[in-house]
Amino acid sequence: VWRALLAAGLDRTLSYAALAASIGRGSACRAVGSAVGANPVAWLIPCHHVLRANGALGGYRWGVDRKRAMLAWELSQTVAAEA
């Protein structure tokens, strides 16, 4: 799961279902969620990039406010780079 997150790249988000499908385990969304939640190095393995299928942030080991802040910071860097 963590390798698949790294392979997905740092510039996009994906759903738990899409992450499960990317490792060939399309029906293992809950197991993927557990693996994502167990990530001890969130900034290095971008588990904050995984969202619910409806686009909601979902949970986060270090709190949803931190997940939101991390995604917002990354977006601001992308916008600044394009300016």
Image (spheres, grey):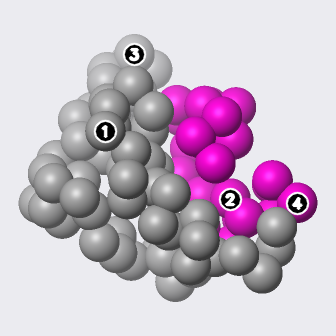
Mark 1 in CB contact with mark 4 (< 8 angstroms): no
Tag 2 near tag 3, CB within 8 Å? no
Disc 3 target residue: 81
Label 1's element? loop
Image height of 6 relative to 66, above or below: above
Q: CA distance from mark 3 to mark 1?
A: 29 Å
Where is residue 3 shown, x and y percent of the image? 66, 34
Task: Name the residue located 34 percent from the left edge and 75 percent from the top edge.
Answer: 58
Q: Is residue 11 left or right of residue 9?
A: left
Numbered circles on residues, count: 4
**Image location (x, y in percent) of residue 6:** 60, 31
Q: Secondary structure at mark 2?
A: helix
Q: Amino acid at mark 3?
A: Ala
At 88% from the left edge and 60% from the top edge, which residue is drawn? 24
Reading the image, the residue beneath label 1 is 40
Q: Which residues are magenta?
A: 1-24
Q: Earlier in the sequence, mark 3 or mark 4?
A: 4
Figure check: 69 above or below 57: above
Three-letter amino acid code at the position of disc 1:
Pro
Indicate whether 70 appears above or below 24.
above
In the rendered image, which residue does mark 4 sit on?
A: 24
Amino acid beneath label 2: Leu
The span from disc 3 to disc 4 (Cα, nearest Å) is 34 Å
* Circle 2 residue: 19
Q: Position of residue 48 (x, y in %)?
A: 37, 50
